[in-house]
Amino acid sequence: MKLINRLKTAMKTQEIRNRVLASALAAVIGIGSMSTAYASAKSDALYKKDQAQSELDAKKNEITDIENKREDLQSEINKLDADLVGIMTSMGILDGEIADKQEELDLATVNLEAAEKDERRQYANMKARIRYMYENGDASLLEVVLGARNFADFLNRIEYASQVYGHDRDLLDAYQETCRQIADYKVQIEGDVAELKEMRGAYEEQEREYEGMIAQKKENMADFDAQLASAKQLAAQYQDVISQQNEIIKREDEKEREEKERKRLEEERRRKEEEKAKADEQKRNSGNSGNGGSDSAGGNGTQGGKGSNGAGSGGGNKNPSYKTNVSGSDVVNYACKFIGNPYVLGGTSLTDGCDCSGFVMSVFANFGISLPHSSYALAGCGSEVSYANAKPGDLICYAGHVAIYIGGGQIVNASSSAPYPVGGIKTNSATYRQILTVRRVL
């Protein structure tokens, strides 16, 4: 009987153990499946995040590159704008000088017409006197001479007639000289006006070129802006993907923590069930052993088992020094050899033709001094000199023009395309126009 009870108890205990193991195995299998699912979703999110981060980093580099190119392009546009402002300023100065020269030309024209009118009037008066004295025959002159009271009066009358002729001759010569001087001055002013207008035409061409370059670069800037906007839009999308994947990873991490906690509680429950099963088995074993002596002992043992289970739960005067051994007088003497040669816009040949900056560049190149082929750039070369301290060989810079200072207030320069002496390589006054700066490059 005791053996049968023991077998029944052992079978019941084994059944309990099997149920606990089956439950634990099912929990482990379920946890493994869920962990695999969590790991798969998280891995997928991490992969997508890494891809998006890689694309975002590439876009950030692309954005930085576009912004750097855009900044460089803006610097180029700003420089072109500044150069264009300089050109327009020079054109404004030229317009003022052209207006002044035109006023001088108009005044010279009026003066020349008045002088020629006076010349014609004096010539007409002289012819009238001569006609009166000679067209009436020798009798008129004879009357003047024979009418003398004495020999002294005779000589005086002859001398007076000579003086009349001489006076007329002197007046006529004076008027003719005045007309010649005014005509020469008019030719000079016409040459100056032609030179200034030709310079303005060159500036207008430069203005068109600069405006074209600025327009082209602004088109490039618009392309950069479009590229930058597109890159930033894609970068924002990649950032959204990263944020979304981070949210997925966060949720999966939370699920993983919850599953680990559930697994821990399940493991704790299973452990307690196993402990309870062992405790129950021990109680039954202990109770079966007590039945051999007294039933009350078994009953006390059962009460003790229940107690055990209950306990277990729970700046001004500038005169810089020279930096070369080249003589300014030598430069001037060499430059003056080419006086009379033609002016050619954009040219650099001292014999076949050159413009103002080409003339200066080629003259100084003969002495081993390299200068730019631009009147605008030459105005920034060397050191600034006060005009009062200008020496032979210094550069005299005007708006859109440059010349070599000879000394004594004179310059030698390639002036305009008009024939010499109005244009071409010639000398003229250094102050015939407003001087912008004097530069010493020797």
Image (cartoon, rainbow, N blue to C red):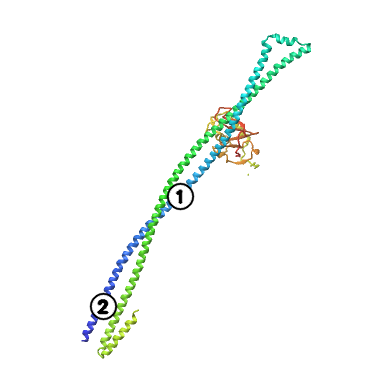
Q: CA distance from mark 2 to mark 1?
A: 74 Å
Q: Position of residue 394 (x, y in %)?
A: 61, 37
Residue 168 position (above or below residue 61) = above
Q: Quadrant of residue 153?
A: top right
In the image, what residue occupies the spot 50% across and 46% down?
75
* Residue at figure coordinates x 44%, y 43% from the top left: 219
Residue shown at the point (43%, 53%) measured from the top left: 60
Can you give x and y, in whole percent of width and height, for residue 51 in the image? 37, 56
Q: Secondary structure at mark 1?
A: helix
> What residue is at 43 percent from the left and 48 percent from the top?
225
Of 230 and 359, the residue lying toward us: 230
Mark earlier in primary sequence (2, 1): 2
Query: Which residue is label 2 attached to?
Result: 16
Q: Position of residue 177 (x, y in %)?
A: 65, 23
Residue marked by disc 1: 67
Q: Quadrant of the C terminus?
A: top right
Q: Between residue 140 and residue 183, name the one nearer to us.
A: 140
Q: Amino acid at mark 2?
A: Ile
Q: Secondary structure at mark 2?
A: helix
Q: Amino acid at mark 1?
A: Glu
**What is the total number of numbered labels drawn onto the structure image?**
2
Task: Tell me where residue 37 appears, x and y as whole percent.
Answer: 31, 64
